[in-house]
């Protein structure tokens, strides 16, 4: 995995991403085109208002997307459509057949932490990057992503972190803000309170769970077209997979398809395992060990017959000087790395 250094204006950061990761961006887009051939994924740009929403609400990210395309020498429309990954799943009803992201966290042991496995389509494996973003007007950020994407999960130097779970059975809003842009919006904030306020005020394009934390604690919100629904923590412990625990803003058709595909049952099994094994006062390294479990499986091994696999894992210890660790792939194939911060 490459750590890509991006600094300056949004356009400059995007160009740095595209230039430094040019082969990976081109390979990722080629694999995406092949995997989505005939699905109409490109229409997410030409036939939906998603990019227009980003331009209106977060124009800096629209500039960054343009910079990625310029730096990598690829079509800007493809870069934008690739970034609307979660939106493509519900708009096209192309739900993955098994497994999804698992998030854990705790604020009981003094210094809060968040950790997660990011499970994604198998064709994305090999495109892992960590972006070090140093914008002109915000905190430094470390972001796990796929080459060409704005963000999958991340933490900033102010100590704000965000992890996510797709909730494909919640309603979506094609005029809302896409998930990748929402993640970056959270990471632009300097404390948990303003990050949560940002999530509450948004129109959300996709059903998604956002776990947000800083040194003061953790918040768990399930977001959909109807807004943001808080999920209470139990004993300061946060666990979440890919079904709602509090929101009732359900898309009945999507829920039926996910149940028949076994996705809801799989999500419930993973959540049960996490709840039974995550100690409220356990240290972050225990959470990292849980994320390596392949029996439930929390960690999805790279089996050819499975359309998904664990793309990477993260662990964020939150405080005045947060610690960020990334594993860009499966246990045994990838090691944990800790890029550190450039700011003094």
Image (spheres, helix red, strand yellow):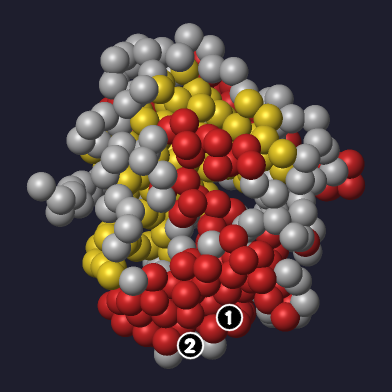
The residue located at (27%, 53%) in the rendering is 140
Marks 2 & 1, CB-CB < 8 Å contact: yes
Q: Describe residue 308's horizontal placement relative to residue 14 as left or right.
A: right
- Residue 201 horizontal/vertical position (percent): 64, 42
Give the residue displayed 23% in from the left and 31% down from the top.
Answer: 320
Q: 295 or 339: nearer the eye?
A: 339
Q: Give the residue at mark 2.
A: 74
151 in relation to 344, above or below: below
Position of the N terminus, as image quadrant, is bottom left
Q: Position of residue 282 (x, y in %)?
A: 33, 16
Mark 1, residues whose alpha carbon is within 10 Å: few (<14), some, or many (≥20)?
Answer: many
Q: Quadrant of residue 259?
A: top right
Q: Which residue is mark 1?
A: 78
Would residue 36 be found to the left or right of residue 118 on screen? right
Query: What's the residue at 42%, 59% (across, down)?
Result: 145
Q: Nearer the viewer, residue 293 or 29?
A: 29
Q: Eyeballing the image, is 7 above or below 230?
A: below
Viewer-proximal residue among 21 and 331: 21
Q: Is residue 314 visible?
A: no
| Residue 64 visible in the snapshot | yes
Reply above or below: 202 against 47: above
Q: How far is mark 2 from mark 1, CA to CA?
A: 8 Å
Instruction: Give residue 44's mark.
Output: none
Which quarter of the picture shows residue 56? bottom right
């Amino acid at each position: 995995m490459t750590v890509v250094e991006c600094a300056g204006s949004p356009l400059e950061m995007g160009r740095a991403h595209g230039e430094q990761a040019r082969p990976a961006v081109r390979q990722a887009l080629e694999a995406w085109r092949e995997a989505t051939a005939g699905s109409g994924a490109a229409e997410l740009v030409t036939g939906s208002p998603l990019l227009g929403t980003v331009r209106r609400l977060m124009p800096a990210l629209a500039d960054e997307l343009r910079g990625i395309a310029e730096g990598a020498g690829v079509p800007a429309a493809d870069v934008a459509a690739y970034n609307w990954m979660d939106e493509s799943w519900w708009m096209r009803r192309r739900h993955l057949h098994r497994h999804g992201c698992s998030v854990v966290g705790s604020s009981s042991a003094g210094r809060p932490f968040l950790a997660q496995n990011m499970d994604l389509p198998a064709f994305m494996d090999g495109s892992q990057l960590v972006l070090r973003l140093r914008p002109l007007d915000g905190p430094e950020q470390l972001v796990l992503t796929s080459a060409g994407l704005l963000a999958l999960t991340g933490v900033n130097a102010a100590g704000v972190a965000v992890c996510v779970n797709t909730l494909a059975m919640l309603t979506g809003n094609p005029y809302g803000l896409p998930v990748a842009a929402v993640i970056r919006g959270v990471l632009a904030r300097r404390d948990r309170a303003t990050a949560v306020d940002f999530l509450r005020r948004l129109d959300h394009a996709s059903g998604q769970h956002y776990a947000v934390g800083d040194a003061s604690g953790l918040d768990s919100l399930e977001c959909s077209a109807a807004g943001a629904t808080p999920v209470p923590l139990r004993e300061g412990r946060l666990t979440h997979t890919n079904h709602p625990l509090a929101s009732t803003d359900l898309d009945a058709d999507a829920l039926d398809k996910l149940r028949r595909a076994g996705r809801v049952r799989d999500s419930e099994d993973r959540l049960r395992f996490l709840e039974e094994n995550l100690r409220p006062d356990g240290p972050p390294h225990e959470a990292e060990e849980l994320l390596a479990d392949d029996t439930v499986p929390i960690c999805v091994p790279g089996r050819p017959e499975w359309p998904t696999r664990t793309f990477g894992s993260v662990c964020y210890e939150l405080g005045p000087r947060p610690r960020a660790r990334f594993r860009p792939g499966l246990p045994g194939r990838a090691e944990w790395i800790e890029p550190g911060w450039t700011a003094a």
